């Protein structure tokens, strides 16, 4: 969630935590909840309230990553994924996809230079009707290690106490790595040039019943360019959506879906810790985006990209975040559905 307050002058922690505050809210696509949610502890309602911008949630819109654009296409599985999971959409074949490129902000009208985090939501459907839904973001790791810590980050970033973020960073030193990434990672001018990472751990089960703990990423075929945030801003407040519409109109865009397999002892409950690069990876297929549609009347508009909607051969692990995400997504979906009259849809006669 963007935070326009300035930290105390000359505070070395302040610089880091300001970035963390900006990215913390925007990365909330990954903060959802499960068994740890109870009435006397953290609830989806509390989490969504903490995500909201100072002016409050925008009626009719997703409560975070509110700014987005739909795409359709396919997942072209090469069959290599079958060695990891019996999921039907990992068998060699072509499967329909409804996806959403999105920007890490709870404000659907935000300028495209206000957040470091970009995301993608996917729904891949197998011939038997089963679905694999996933939500990925551009950072290589999450800012904090637990759902409770994420709520504390949101609370600190929205606090009027000038020392709140400094105190949070002291209690959660893992955020320093995320702050360093936010400062140094290049900005790209296109969703097509972003790598998207599924930071949470899941379990794949193959046809023999063997389980493996995995994470996955989408690696772009398009070469990444670097652009200064101010130069991106000069292209307009909706530069990313405008660019991806033009790019896909000129030709389909592709990403390789790469699955990383954990070694014994790798942290499976903590998305703030990346696994070493030398872990086994399997390229299981290619995501192809071949049509872009504005969200108001687009096919992704009413999809809840709940990461616990999984086909046979996949299940959640001991990582608490996917279940947490599911609970918060459900509440967000119910609220925006109830507010449908507030969402600016395009009249049928105005469609091109």
Image: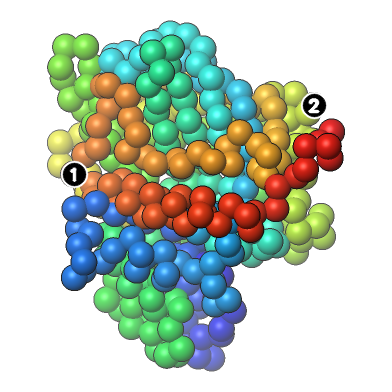
Give the percent coordinates (x, y) of residue 250: 79, 26
Which residue is found at the position 74% from the left and 53% from the top? 238
Residue 135 visible at all:
yes
Q: Secondary structure at mark 1?
A: loop
Q: Please tell me how crowded label 2 is: few (under 14), some (14-19), or many (20+) other residues with Cα within 10 Å.
A: few
Which residue is found at the position 56% from the left and 34% from the top? 99
Asked whether the beta carbons under mark 2 and mark 1 sit within 8 Å of each other, the answer is no
- Tell me the quadrant of the picture where the C terminus can be found: top right
Rendered image quadrant of residue 60: bottom right
| Vertical comparison of 294 with 28: above or below | above
The reply, left or right, for residue 66 in relation to residue 344 is left
Which residue is found at the position 36% from the left and 64% from the top? 45
Mark sitting on residue 31: none
Q: Which residue is mark 2?
A: 250
The reply, left or right, for residue 155 in relation to residue 279 is right
Q: Please tell me how crowded label 1 is: few (under 14), some (14-19), or many (20+) other residues with Cα within 10 Å.
A: some
Decide which of 74, 128 is in the foreground and name it. 128
Decide which of 299, 83 is in the foreground and name it. 299
Of mark 2 and mark 1, the one earlier in the sequence is: 2
| Vertical comparison of 132 with 107: above or below | above
Give the percent coordinates (x, y) of residue 139: 47, 51
Q: Which residue is mark 1?
A: 318
Decide which of 283, 29 is in the foreground and name it. 29
Residue 78 visible at all:
no
Give the percent coordinates (x, y) of residue 30: 40, 52
Which residue is found at the position 47% from the left and 9% from the top? 93
Give the percent coordinates (x, y) of residue 106: 55, 62
| Vertical comparison of 149 with 282: above or below | below
Check the image and tell me how it is coloured.
rainbow
What is the C-alpha distance between the residues marked 2 and 1? Answer: 43 Å
């Amino acid at each position: 969630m963007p935070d326009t307050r300035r930290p105390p002058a000359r505070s070395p922690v302040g610089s880091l935590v300001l970035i963390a505050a900006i990215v913390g809210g925007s990365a909330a696509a990954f903060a959802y909840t499960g068994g740890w949610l109870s009435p006397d502890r953290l609830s989806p309602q509390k989490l969504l309230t903490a995500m909201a911008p100072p002016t409050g949630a925008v009626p009719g819109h997703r409560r975070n990553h509110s700014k987005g654009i739909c795409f359709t296409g396919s997942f072209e599985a090469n069959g290599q994924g079958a060695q990891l999971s019996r999921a039907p959409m990992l068998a060699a074949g072509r499967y329909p996809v409804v996806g959403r490129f999105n920007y890490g902000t709870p404000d659907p009208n935000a300028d495209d230079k206000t957040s470091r985090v970009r995301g993608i939501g996917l729904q891949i459907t197998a011939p038997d009707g089963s679905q694999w839904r996933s939500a990925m973001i551009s950072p290589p790791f999450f800012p904090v290690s637990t759902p409770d810590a994420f709520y504390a980050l949101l609370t600190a970033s929205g606090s009027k106490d000038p020392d709140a973020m400094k105190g949070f960073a002291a209690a959660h030193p893992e955020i320093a790595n995320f702050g360093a990434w936010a400062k140094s990672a290049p900005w790209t001018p296109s969703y097509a040039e972003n790598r998207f990472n599924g930071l949470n751990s899941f379990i794949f089960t193959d046809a023999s019943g063997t389980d493996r703990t995995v994470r996955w990423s989408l690696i772009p075929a398009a070469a990444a360019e670097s652009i200064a945030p101010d130069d991106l801003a000069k292209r307009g407040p909706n530069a990313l959506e405008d660019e991806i519409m033009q790019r896909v109109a000129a030709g389909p865009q592709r990403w390789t879906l790469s699955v990383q397999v954990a070694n014994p002892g790798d942290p499976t409950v903590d998305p703030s810790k990346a696994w070493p690069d030398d872990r086994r990876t399997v390229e299981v297929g290619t995501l192809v985006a071949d049509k872009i549609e504005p969200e108001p009347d687009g096919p992704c508009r009413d999809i809840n990209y709940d990461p616990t909607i999984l086909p046979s051969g996949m299940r959640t692990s001991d990582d608490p975040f996917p279940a947490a995400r599911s609970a918060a997504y459900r509440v967000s979906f119910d609220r925006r559905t109830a507010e449908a009259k507030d969402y600016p849809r395009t009249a049928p006669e105005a469609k091109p």
